[in-house]
Image: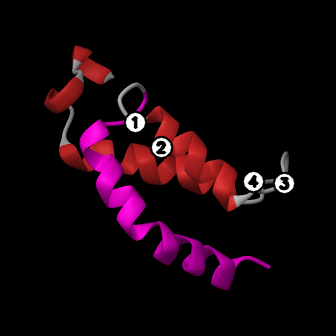
Amino acid sequence: YPMGLAGENIPLEARIMAVADVFDALVSRRCYKDRMDFNDAYDIIVDGMGSQFDPALEKYFVEIYDSLMKYYVSVQH
């Protein structure tokens, strides 16, 4: 991370955006890839808690997962 920050020294907003950015990248179609299944993306995010993502955010991600899935289904073509 920039300036050598790690763990809780990384701003909370950045830690939240890391989860959001990866989830969006996984479940969204791109010109170079198809979208990933929501359940597969969920597994990748949850498996990354504690290594790639702040483990304290896992409970919040799990809590909002159904709402996220409904949102993405509503906006995907």
Type of amino acid at the residue the image marks with label 3:
Asp
Q: Amino acid at mark 1?
A: Met
Q: Which secondary structure dominates the residues rendered in magenta? A: helix
CB under 8 Å between discs 3 and 4: yes
Looking at the rendered structure, which numbered label has been put on residue 46? 2
Q: Residue at the left extreme?
A: 9
**Residue nearest the viewer, comparing 5 with 72:** 72
Tell me whether the residue at label 1 lies in contact with that at label 4, contact meaning CB atoms closer than 8 angstroms: no
| Residue type, label 4 | Met
Residue identifier under label 4: 36
- Considering depth in this image, is 16 or 32 the residue closer to the camera? 16
Residue neighbourhood size for the residue with mark 4, other residues' Cα within 10 Å, grouped as few (<14), some (14–19), many (≥20): some
Q: Helix, strand or loop at disc 2?
A: helix
Queried whether the magenta region covers residue 75, the answer comes back as: yes
Query: In the displayed structure, does residue 24 sit left or right of residue 62?
Result: right
Of circles 3 and 4, the one toward us is 4
Q: Residue at x 24, y 43 (%)?
A: 56
Callout in the foreground (2, 3): 2
Element marked by disc 3: loop
Q: Which residue is mark 1?
A: 49
Q: Which residue is mark 3?
A: 34
Percent position (x, y) of residue 31?
A: 84, 53
**Which residue sits at x=37%, y=50%?**
17
Q: Colour scheme used in the picture? A: secondary structure
Magenta residues, start to end = 52-77
Q: CA distance from mark 4 to mark 2?
A: 15 Å
- Mark 3 or mark 1: which comes first in sequence? 3
- Residue 74: within the magenta? yes
Q: Please tell me whether mark 3 or mark 1 is closer to you in this view.
A: 1
Amino acid carrying label 2: it is Val
Q: CA distance from mark 3 to mark 4?
A: 6 Å
CB-based contact (under 8 Å), mark 1 and mark 2: yes
